[in-house]
Structures are given as C-alpha cells and as structure tokens.
Image (tube, helix red, strand yellow):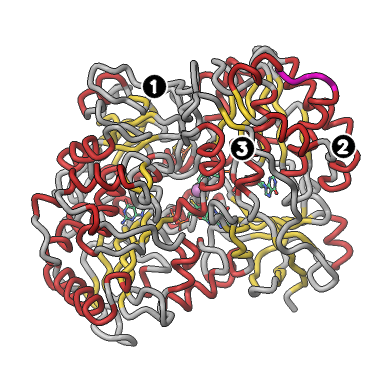
Amino acid sequence: MQADAGTPTHCPYCALQCGMRVSADGAGGRPAVTITPRTDVPANDGGLCQKGWTAGELLTSPDRLTTPLLRERRGAPLRPAGWDEALDFAAARIRAIQAEHGADAVAVFGGGGLTNEKAYLLGKFARVALRTSQIDYNGRFCMSSAAAATNRAFGLDRGLPFPITDVARADAILLAGGNLAETMPPFVRHLTRMREAGGRLIVVDPRRTPTARQADLHLQITPGTDLALALGLLHIAIAEGLVDEDYIERRTTGFDAVRTSVSAWWPERAERVTGIPVAQMRETVRTLAAARNAMILTGRGAEQHAKGTDTATAFINLALALGLPGRPGSGYGCVTGQGNGQGGREHGQKSDQLPGYRRLDDPAAREHVARVWGVDPADLPGPGRSAYELLDALGTPDGPRALLLLGSNPVVSAPRAGHIADRIAALDLLVVSDLVLSETAELADVVLPATQWAEETGTITNLEGRVLLRRRAVPPPPGVRGDLAVISGLARRLGQDPAAFPEDPRAVFDELRRASAGGVADYSGITYERIEAETGVFWPCPAEDHPGTPRPFLDRFPTPDGRARFVPVDHRAAVEDIDDGYPIYLTTGRVLAQYQSGAQTRRIRALNEAAPEVYVELHPDLAERLGITAGERVRVTSRRGTAEGVARISTAIRSDTVFMPFHWAGDGRANLLTNPALDPTSRMPEFKVCAVRLERVA
Ligand SMILES: Nc1nc2c(c(=O)[nH]1)N[C@H]1C(S)=C(S)[C@@H](COP(=O)(O)OP(=O)(O)OC[C@H]3O[C@@H](n4cnc5c(=O)[nH]c(N)nc54)[C@H](O)[C@@H]3O)O[C@H]1N2
Ligand SMILES: Nc1nc2c(c(=O)[nH]1)N[C@H]1C(S)=C(S)[C@@H](COP(=O)(O)OP(=O)(O)OC[C@H]3O[C@@H](n4cnc5c(=O)[nH]c(N)nc54)[C@H](O)[C@@H]3O)O[C@H]1N2
Ligand code: SF4
Ligand SMILES: [Mo]
C-alpha cells in the first residue's frame, strides 16, 4: 500500500496526538482498518507507539456497544433498547428529578479525551439546557495543577508554550515526574535529537524508568518532595550567582519575595527532605544555567499532589530565575495527558469556566458567551464543584441525584475509587455514553453506544496548543451514534431549539469559534480548511488571516503588565506521611501498553499480552524484609482500602516506595488505595503519594 493512502487523522489516545493514516482494508461485513504513521505531523514525525498501531482493533471489537441499554429500575438487568426509548427515558427522569430537587440535582462529568466540539457542546448543554452548576471533568485529575500554576505565573495555560520541535534545540532539559518513554514514546525522538546534538537530560523520578535510563542524570526523589527540590535548586542558583538578572528585571515581577522565600532552603536541608544528594542538585542547576537554551518540563509525577500547584509554581520560579520562558528553544512546559487534554480544558466543561478559557465568574465573559448562546447572562449558573468533590457528593442529601457521564471511567480512575463507586451507586439516575461497557457504564441506568475516533470528525488540541483535525475514515456500526447526537437529542427532549444544539461538528466548531473570540484561548481564526492546509493551527488565533501563535510569550506575557509573575511558595509534607502502621510510600502511574482506566486498551489483544495484569513494583531489599518473592500475589493496604497485585521485584525503585499502575479494575485497582486529599487551588487529588503496608496473600 502507498505510504500516503488512507484518511489522514490522529490517534485516539494521548496528547501527543500522533498523526496517522487510516484505511479500510477488510472485505465483507464491517471493514478492519490499516494504520500507518504520518510524517507530516511534527509531534510524532513518522512514529507511533504500540497503542497507536493497534488502535484500530477496538473499532471491530466484539466488546463494542452497538445498541442503547436500559435499566428501568434499580436491581433490574440492563436490556437492549431503542434510541428514542433510551433518550426519552433519560430526559423524562432528568425533568422529574430537576422538578423535585432543583436544577443542580443533575450533574455532568466530561473528559479530556472528548473533541473540542463535544466538550463545548457538553458545557453549553449543562449551562443552558440543564441550567446546572454541577459540571466538571477528569482533566482535574490530570494537568489542573500545572494549569493553575501557569495561569498564575504567565496569565495563560498552554501545556507547551512552544512547538514540540523546540525540544531538540535545547541544550539541557529538566523533566520532573514524567515518563515519556512509556507515556508518549515518539516524544523521545525529540529528546534523542537534543542529546545527539550534545544536550543533557535530567530526570526526576522515584523510579529508574525507561525515561530515566536515557537521562544523563537521574534524581531518584522521595515521592511528594519535588517542591522542596525546586526550592533547593533555586536557592543554589541564587547563591552561585546563576540567575539571569537582566531577564528578571525586564520580564518579571515579584522576584524579591521569592528570593527571600527560598533563602531557608539551603541545599543540605533540601537533600534531607528529597533524598537527593547536594552534588546532584548543584550539577542540575549548573547544567541548566550553562545551557544556551534550557527547558524545565513537568509531568504528573510532580503535579498530582495536594501541593501540585505550588510545586509547578516552584519549577516555574526556577525557570523564570534562569530566564527561560519566552526564549525560543527554552521555557517551562507541562507535558499534557489526554488526547484533548489541552482543548478539553478551554471550552467550558470545567466547573468554573466558559469557552475560550473564560472565567464563569467574570461578568464580561458571561455577557459575551450568553450573547452567543442567545440567553440572558443572569440565567447562566455560577461555578460548581470540582471533579472529586462532585463525585463525592453524588447521591448525598445536598448533592446531585443524577449524572450524565461522557468520556471517563471514574470507578477505576478516581481517587478512593471504592467510595466513589458507592456514591455512583447511590444515584437515582446514571446516564453513560461510552464505546464499551466500562466499569462505570455497568452501573448505569441508561448506556448509550458512542462512535469512535476513526468514525467521526472533530478537532483536538494537542500538547503544544496546536489545533488538529480528526477525520472520519470509516463508517460507524449501525446503531451507534456520536456524542454530539446524544447531547443534541437530550437537549431537544428538554425543550431546547435543535438549532442551538447541532449534531454537525463543523456547525458546533463555528459556534465555538464565536464563543471563544476575544478569550484567552481564541479559536475564532481557525477553520477546518486551515487546519487541513497548515497541519494544525496554534491558538490564540483571533482572525482568519492571523498566523496562529506557536510561541505566545516571545515579547510579552499575557498578564495585565506584560510581565511574568514570581509567586513565593513553600514546601509541605505529603498529606499522609509514612508511619509505623503504614510504613511504605505508594505511588501510581502508567505502563506503555495500557491507557488510563484500561476500558479501551484492556480489550486489545496485543496490549493485553504486553501488560496483562496489575503489579506491585518493589525493591529487593523491601521484598526480602517482607518475605515476598517475585511473581507472588501481594496485598497492599492504605487507610482507604486494600488492593492486590503481582509482586515485581526491581532495583529500579526506591526501597521505601512501591509503584502500582492504575489501569486495572476490580480488586487490582490502585485507586482503592489513593488519597483524595485535594490541592487548595487546582483541586487535584494526591494520586502520587500515600502511605501503605504490604503483605503476601496467604
Ligand atoms: N501508556 C500510556 N500513555 C499515556 C497514558 C496512559 O494511561 N498510558 N495517559 C496519558 C495521560 S492522560 C497522561 S496525564 C500522561 C501522564 O504521563 P506521565 O506524567 O509521564 O505519567 P505517570 O506514569 O502518571 O507519571 C510519571 C512518573 O512520575 C513518577 N512519580 C511518581 N511519584 C512522583 C513524585 O512524587 N515525584 C516525581 N518527580 N515523580 C513521581 C512515576 O514513577 C512515573 O514514572 O500520559 C499520557 N500517556
Ligand atoms: N492512581 C492514579 N489514578 C489516576 C491517575 C494516576 O496517575 N494515578 N491519573 C489520572 C489522570 S491524569 C487521568 S487523565 C484520569 C483518566 O481516567 P479516566 O477519566 O477514567 O479516562 P479513560 O480511561 O480514558 O476513560 C475514558 C472512558 O470514555 C470512553 N471513551 C473514549 N472516548 C470516548 C468518546 O469519544 N466518547 C465517549 N462517550 N466515551 C469515550 C472510554 O471507553 C472510557 O470508558 O485518571 C486519573 N487517575
Ligand atoms: S504516543 Fe500517544 S498519540 Fe502517539 S501513538 Fe502512542 S498513544 Fe497514540
Ligand atoms: Mo491525564
């Protein structure tokens, strides 16, 4: 087959949004597809990971939902139903629940994997059709801490505020809490180019991951202490006279307060807290300061903490002190997660947000968006609960009694998942749109079968802030409908004008453009045609003749005075530290072959063979102390619950820490253990550190 055969589109999974071509190649029945990587998309530059290569398998999986399912009363089994029957049932129940308990009794939960069009229409549906304040999404669990920190420092939150190809131009990169070799394998090409040109990579991770193994320096940190590390690094930079005084003077405010705040973080103190030797800290700072171009990148390892916002802030302070943000080839970036992790946080499925990255509590923003929506600004609800708080309130006397959920599987992925499953079970009505019967969909009263990436068209915004177009390449199976049709169908049944809730993605995108116009994330100049012609357009893009903005911080920062803001922060311990009862740190994360809650990837044969079951990674010293041998089942217990997995013994992890991936369901759920303590600003849960004990399963 020719290399350029097939429909050009993008991968269904992570935020790298690798470009691929999809062609139907089967004969008879529903066609299977062939996937080939695109070379015209800089993010993957001809590469794909194993998840991308195998993404076509779920299109024809026997596990796929092809008809709506309905449970007429609690305790009854789910049974197949027609679309009208299912939507009529859901709409009637929503009306009844709102009539009895008020608008906020119905909640909406979205996902960062949904296209911009879906995220936008879902936010509008909540505010206009349901008039509920109770909407949030799984992005809270993802990059909300870095988002809060970058908004605070730069006045704008765009994961990488530079094209990904800038990575190869750096001479040094500090990557804190990211395992790109497993979470975005083709990203490693950019790191390799950087290193081949003489650049140095420094990785901060409690584990010697495949990424850390490629680093020139690995800082094997105690979980939950990145904030102290960043403070210690800045202390060293100041003490050794390595800060960029000229840049600080010209482009920032607030350095004096930060200088004072790190004065007590002398290196030996930072070493005591983080476990990282002073010599390695000095080497890190000197490497970054000596580089012509340098980058500081954070991943979930540094961000998913109850102090994630302050941790990201401390790394931004370090980047500012070294004069990095806004300099081409340099900067601070957050390596975003889900397919549309970036766009999904810009257009209104977040509890405090309106399209265009506008604030729901800003009167001018309400005015603008209400005009586009043809409603009275006074009728738009105010900000609601954040993701965990929303899930935690379900079915409680003051909380929502009904939930519409698209694009998330919180029974597996939410912190303290056992409790969240109980809350979901306490609802009067759960409506789930999904591709498969996920663990959360299993609890639903109405399940709606959704089309998949290759069967529908829509835009996604990748980790660089580049708006891309996914194109329909194959027809969906009969009986399956897109999320836009679901939202539209429900809106119509709730009395809305169908024209205000179109099913056509292009019509939704055109409205999104108007709603975002003038906002921080301005998409008004972006069209499907431009995206096709230019292989993506960087926001902000305020006019059709505007070139888009690959590097938004070049000349000024989008703050009122055009300067970046230093913000003083201080270290605090993990919310739950280890003690005699729970003497080991648990941290959680990902493996290459599984994606998120695993709802999609656990159904793909090659991926399941590569990563068949949950494991508990522990150091040989710890294993010996506990009498645990490789391959046997171990029980992990925290204050929230108990989970089991197979022991994987490895010198790659600290001996005071165990690691579990969170991709599996049932009693292998890492999230039965995790601590839902929340960051005060971002409301991010402390996924990356809690205290546990370990024992062999008798
Ligand atoms: N294969 C695969 N790829 C994915 C995903 C997936 O599920 N599977 N999900 C996508 C999404 S949504 C996201 S958000 C990204 C996440 O991408 P990453 O942030 O790279 O992924 P994680 O594995 O969650 O965490 C990264 C590393 O943080 C380390 N870590 C744990 N605790 C700490 C700590 O306290 N400090 C530091 N410095 N490091 C710590 C872990 O050991 C882990 O190696 O991946 C995306 N890509
Ligand atoms: N312990 C621990 N827990 C974590 C994390 C961690 O590092 N450690 N990471 C957190 C992070 S960063 C994230 S992003 C979350 C992710 O966790 P989840 O929010 O659970 O994400 P997914 O598993 O991707 O769930 C997506 C669901 O939607 C379905 N789906 C996919 N595409 C579509 C679509 O277009 N429409 C509809 N209707 N459905 C669709 C899938 O089949 C799946 O059931 O997990 C968080 N949980
Ligand atoms: S790195 Fe991410 S976008 Fe690329 S193929 Fe793998 S899962 Fe898909
Ligand atoms: Mo994520």
Q: Which residue is mark 3?
A: 298
Rendered residue at 25%/45% (across/down): 367
Label 3: few (<14), some or many (≥20) within 10 Å? many
| Cα distance in 3D space between marks 2 and 3 | 23 Å
Rendered residue at 50%/39% (across/down): 336
Question: Quarter for ligand 2?
Answer: bottom left
Please name which of the two marks, 3 or 1, marks the residue nearer to the observer: 1
Apparent side of residue 311 relative to residue 468 in the rendered image (left or right): right
Residue 601 among those drawn in magenta: no
Label 2 residue SS = loop
Q: Which mark is residue 167?
A: none
Q: Which residue is mark 2?
A: 266
Q: Which residues are magenta?
A: 240-244
| Cα distance in 3D space between marks 3 and 1 | 22 Å
- The N terminus is located in which quarter? top left
Whole-percent x, y for residue 583 in the image: 82, 66
Q: Is residue 189 above or below residue 178?
A: above
Label 2: few (<14), some or many (≥20) within 10 Å? some
Q: Which residue is mark 1?
A: 549
Disc 3 marks a residue whose amino acid type is: Thr
